[in-house]
Amino acid sequence: MLILVNGINYLHDSVVNIFKFLGFGLTDKDLHFWFVGIIGIAIFVLSDLLFRYVTRWSISVISFIYTCTVLIVVVFGLEIEQKITGRGAMEFADIVSGLWGFIVMLSGLLAIKATLYLTKKLYQKFNSKER
């Protein structure tokens, strides 16, 4: 994780220096405006293409992707809140554990749904043979 943070900081400093060298009087806020804007548009275009493709299979796939995205933001927010307030330890393992909880519970829900679906299909199959 520290390598990633150092890499991002190095990239940030390099971009600032390149823009200074080129004579652009951009502030840190200006750079954030442009880079986050460009990254956001790229993510939007890619996710729009992905979601259009995935909807051919099932809307539940989009629901899963959306839920995972929101949960990632929430668990990181919880860990940051713990660090700021000093209540609890800010640990990456907590994030992984929380997301695993979602995966396990979602698997249970899907197993229940599959069982109900198969039971209904079997009931319909045997019920239609009797007539």
Image (spheres, rainbow, N blue to C red):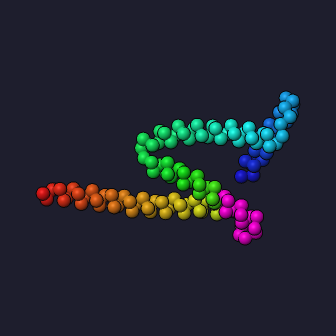
> Does the magenta run of residues contain 88?
yes
Determine whether, in the image, residue 18 is placed left or right of residue 48.
right
| Quarter-of-image position of residue 20 | top right
Count how many numbered circles sit on residues in the image. 0
Camera-side residue of 104 and 81:
81
Which secondary structure dominates the residues rendered in magenta?
helix
Q: Is residue 49 above or below residue 123?
A: above
Look at 75% across and 49% down and name the residue there. 5
x and y percent of residue 46 in the render?
A: 57, 38
Look at 72% across and 70% down and name the residue there. 87
> Does the magenta run of residues contain 60?
no
Give the farthest residue toward the left.
131
Camera-side residue of 41 and 10:
41
Look at 29% across and 61% down and name the residue there. 119
Camera-side residue of 123 and 91:
123
The answer to whether residue 14 is seen in the rendering is no
Report the quarter where the C terminus lies.
Answer: bottom left
Determine whether, in the image, residue 14 is placed left or right of residue 79.
right
Q: Is residue 41 above or below residue 3?
A: above
x and y percent of residue 33 in the render?
A: 74, 41
Give the farthest residue toward the bottom.
87
The answer to whether residue 105 is seen in the rendering is yes
Give the farthest residue toward the top.
22
x and y percent of residue 28 in the render?
A: 82, 42
The magenta stretch is 76-93
Camera-side residue of 78 and 93:
78
Look at 17% across and 56% down and name the residue there. 128
x and y percent of residue 116 in the render?
A: 33, 61
| Quarter-of-image position of residue 26 | top right
